Amino acid sequence: MSKTILVIAEHSDGKLRQVSYEAIQAAKLCTKKGDNIHIAILGYQITELANSISDESIEKIYVMDHPDLEQYNPESYVAGVNQLVELSSPEGIVLGHTAIGRDLAPIISASHDAGQISDVIKIETLENEVLFTRPIYAGKAFETKKFCSTPWVLTIRPNNIDTIEIKNGSIAIEKVEYSNPISLRATIQQVVRNTSGKVDLSEAKIVVAGGRGVKSQEGFKPLQELADLLGGAVGASRGACDADYCDYSLQIGQTGKVVTPEIYIACGISGAIQHVAGMSQSKVIIAINKDRDAPIFKIADFGIVGDLFTVVPMLTEEFKQVLA
Ligand code: FAD
């Protein structure tokens, strides 16, 4: 019998987020020929977004457009998603392991008495089973799990599952009226962005992160210049945030963001276990530190022993030449 997987797509600034395309790929890995993938896009004035998805695996895109869905609000989003789950009757629901996904997924699981596997970084098919791998103990070990019942809910960590090609398409779009607006117990009055970065840190392919070794707010400027040149984002250790060199929204680690970029450049970061928990899954780690015994070198693929204020501008100049 064929099955359906429903992907809850996220968007920001009028575009689908990269992790939404990765979630579609994750859904594809959970399906066989003849199965269906449905996409759900919830928001306000977002109908156009449905045109930015094209893949032969997708049967239908549900668009739910309502002012109550303009900002993420768990109450309205759960009501909307549950309405779409009823329409789609999926065996599985896939979300990004993002701030929204982490909040929404357990509520949806609880509503449908579904099993949940979170923060998945790898999906494999073995004979007739689909296996999901996720890091545990702050990335020190991995566990592989499978679902034993349906429905199920999955969240995938950004930047780990390949993405489907991002292109415009013409997939059947079903506009669904948000039919039962509930009386919200809390509403969002205003969202004030506290980040200046052009690239979302949790989805960035390249992260240039600074630690206490950066020494000041001014010290982050060369890091920002390198990140801008490479189309990446700036991150930080808690040491740098605590010292007020940068905003806490940049903090990476156990109590900050988890990032898995292609390249992570750690500048003046010692490599404390709590920091490593947030970046150890990066594909290539480059560490710049003037202390050759700094623990960050133990997990680095490339280490540069030196003063970051000399090395980072040198790297920027080299990349400028290469990219010219
Ligand atoms: P330091 O450890 O002070 O290291 C600075 C490094 O910069 C040193 O290695 C030094 O050699 C190098 N350096 C100095 N000057 C230069 C220079 N000119 N050029 C090159 N290198 C230079 N930390 C996080 O990052 N994220 C978290 O989420 C997090 N959560 C935590 C949760 C808990 C419960 C606790 C207890 C701690 C947490 N921490 C977290 C803090 C963590 O333990 C470390 O204190 C912190 O990561 C240290 O930051 P740092 O590496 O920038 O600073």
Image (tube, rainbow, N blue to C red):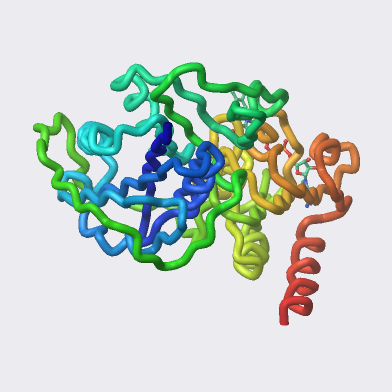
Along the viewing direction, whichever of 62 and 301 lies nearer the viewer: 62
**Residue 79 place in picture, x, y as percent:** 21, 33
Name the quadrant containing residue 157.
Answer: top right
Residue drawn where x is 86% and y is 53% of the image: 304
How many circles with numbers are drawn on the protein?
0
- Whether residue 134 appears in this view of the structure is no
Quadrant occupied by the N terminus: top left
Q: Is residue 19 above or below residue 227?
A: above
Residue drawn where x is 71% and y is 28% of the image: 273
Q: Is residue 282 above or below residue 207?
A: above
Quadrant occupied by the C terminus: bottom right
Along the viewing direction, whichever of 34 and 108 lies nearer the viewer: 34
Q: Residue furthest bottom?
A: 324
Picture quadrant of ligand 1: top right
**Residue 237 place in picture, x, y as percent:** 63, 41
Whether residue 81 sits left or right of residue 247 in the image: it is left
Residue drawn where x is 79% and y is 48% of the image: 287
- Whether residue 316 appears in this view of the structure is yes
**Residue 229 place in picture, x, y as percent:** 64, 70
**Residue 320 place in picture, x, y as percent:** 73, 76
Residue drawn where x is 54% and y is 32% of the image: 119
